[in-house]
Amino acid sequence: MPIEKFTRLVSSAVPLPAENVDTDQILPARFLKAVTREGFGEYLFRDLRFDSAGNPLPDFPLNRPEYAGRILVAGRNFGSGSSREHAAWALVDYGFRAVISSFFADIFRNNALNNGLLPVQVSEQYLNVIFLAIDRDPKVRITIDLEKQKVMLGEDIYWFEINPFRKQCLLNGWDDVDYLLGLQNEIRKYEENSNT
């Protein structure tokens, strides 16, 4: 599945204020049978979204009609636990393009970036500002400008860090293989010069 270019995203957001949401909560292990990226969205947060009979839990944010958008705003330490890449696949397949949190597990962050999902790390204070804004108005728009590395919520601006290589890949819609394929001419020239 090709990665969608990420330049600037303007969207409402889904709040998930719980802390320490691990990859097994994002995508339970029993759904890891497929090896392609498609189809995991329906299992996103499965055990948090549904009861044991498969009925939607009305208080879970993804089941509440007032919340929608391509941004997930999550509590601290999002994506901890096992290294399953499927967790990032599920978030992307569900429709999310970015996750905002005050802390991400390193492996989750890398898996997200490799799959076109932007993890935006903000301060605890700014995360609380976002949660309060969504609480006041579930349709509030958040802007994430990857090129300028900033999150905007009305007049509030937060500048975030991102690895320059990963930023370049997201801006161009590249995964690691696409990036290497884009270097074919340089690699060929290097090999030609090395053989002379």
Image: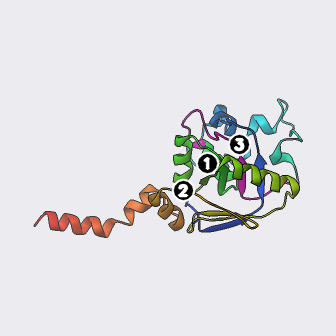
**Number of marks in the rendered image:** 3
> In the image, 13: left or right of 151?
right
Determine which residue is flagged by label 1: 89
Q: CA distance from mark 2 to mark 1?
A: 23 Å
Q: Mark 3 near mark 1, Cβ–Cβ under 8 Å? A: no
N-terminal label among 3 and 1: 3
Mark 1: few/some/many CA within 10 Å (<14, 14-19, 20+): many
Front position in the image: 142 or 7? 142
Mark 3: few/some/many CA within 10 Å (<14, 14-19, 20+): many
Residue located at (52% from left, 41% from top):
107
- Secondary structure at badge 1 equals helix
Q: Is residue 39 visible?
A: no
Determine which residue is flagged by label 2: 161
Determine which residue is flagged by label 3: 75
Which stretch did the figure color magenta?
Answer: 66-86
Closest to the camera, between mark 3 and mark 1, is 3
Q: Amino acid at mark 2?
A: Glu
- Dividing the picture into quadrants, the one containing residue 2 is bottom right
Residue located at (67% from left, 52% from top):
100
- Magenta stretch, main secondary structure class: loop
Residue located at (66% from left, 36% from top):
31
